[in-house]
Image (cartoon, rainbow, N blue to C red):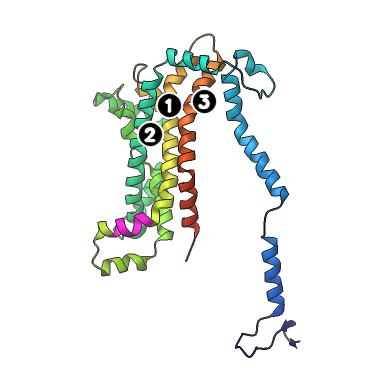
Amino acid sequence: MSQNTRGGAVTAQALPGGMPDVPVRHRRSKRKRVAVYGKPGWFSYVILTLAVIGFAYPLWWSFVVASGTNATRGETLPFIPGPNFMSNVKIVLDAVPFWKALGNSLLVSTIVTISVVTFSTLAGYAFAKLRFKGRDKLMVFVIATMAIPTQLGIIPLFMVMRELDWTGEIQAVIVPILVTAFGVFFMRQYLSGVIPDELIEAARVDGANQIRTFWNVAVPAARPAMAILGLFTFMMAWTDFLWPLIILNASNPTLQTALSQLQSGYYIDFSVVLAGAVMATVPLLVLFVAAGKQLISGIMQGAVKG
């Protein structure tokens, strides 16, 4: 052991086994950093528990009111469910075409999700890794379209659908959102950082064409982002309300527009309205539970570098 008075650091002599001369102070500070980022304490669990309760209680409150009566809504923080949930569900099923609306929403959300994920991944890969004239300007144009409010294009879009004789048809809800600017931008940003150019060049040297390079190189790398984009897109299509309300009629609604009929009268029974809202939320909860493990696994795989 020797001291280096010039640098002010305590160092260790090289050992017979050939170990390098490592500063002792640096090794101690590293041990301290490892100790700091160790197992989380009770305070972290308390904060997480309070956050979970805060996020979950609105859904539980909706279920409690849906299982009670209209007077339950006026109670202060109701917690215990009532006995009327099934009767309120029966009222919902009798008041609106629930099953047809559920099928329409599933059809719209599934087709839109598959289309957005597919075309956004293709376009994102092209913008991120292909070289063509006007690429950056075209990407700026795509991003600029995100700044245009959706409400601004409703009247021209309705006129187009009327010319196509699609008013009241479910394809009028599907076609306008088959591709989104956000999806293209999201996949472009992800693929530009996760795929090295050397990997694409190696695939081309091995004789892979552009389609095979995309399928064998870009798609496996893009799976975490595709899972997140698919989940967000499904939620967006499932909860979309304004455009389906305008273009569809009462006999062929999506789930959100059908449930809006529950509060169209002079007297609104909020226990029935929230029963319908809980029923509309169940498919999203099932989706999160079914895809949650795969989604987290994809995020962790995408976060690992090297």
Amino acid type of the residue that numbered disc 2 sits on in the rendered structure:
Ser
Foreground mark, 1 or 3, reads 3
Q: Is residue 288 left or right of residue 208?
A: right
If you read the primary sequence from the N terminus, does the residue marked by circle 2 or circle 1 appear first?
A: 2
Amino acid type of the residue that numbered disc 3 sits on in the rendered structure:
Val
CA–CA distance between discs 2 and 1?
15 Å
Task: Residue at 36%, 36% (x, y): give it.
Answer: 110
| Circle 2 crowding by C-alpha within 10 Å: few under 14, some 14–19, many from 20 | many
Asked which secondary structure carries label 3, the reply is helix
The N terminus: image quadrant: bottom right
**Which residues fall within the magenta stretch?**
213-220
- The residue that mark 2 highlights is 109
Amino acid type of the residue that numbered disc 1 sits on in the rendered structure:
Leu
Residue situated in front as seen by the camera: 220 or 253: 220
On screen, residue 49 above or below 9: above
Residue 149 in sight? no
Residue situated in front as seen by the camera: 154 or 220: 220
| Circle 1 crowding by C-alpha within 10 Å: few under 14, some 14–19, many from 20 | few
CA–CA distance between discs 1 and 3?
20 Å
Q: Which mark is residue 242?
A: 1
Badges 2 and 3: C-beta atoms under 8 Å apart? no
Pinpoint residue 203: horizontal percent, then vertical percent. Answer: 29, 66
- The residue that mark 3 highlights is 278
CA–CA distance between discs 2 and 3?
18 Å
Foreground mark, 2 or 3, reads 3
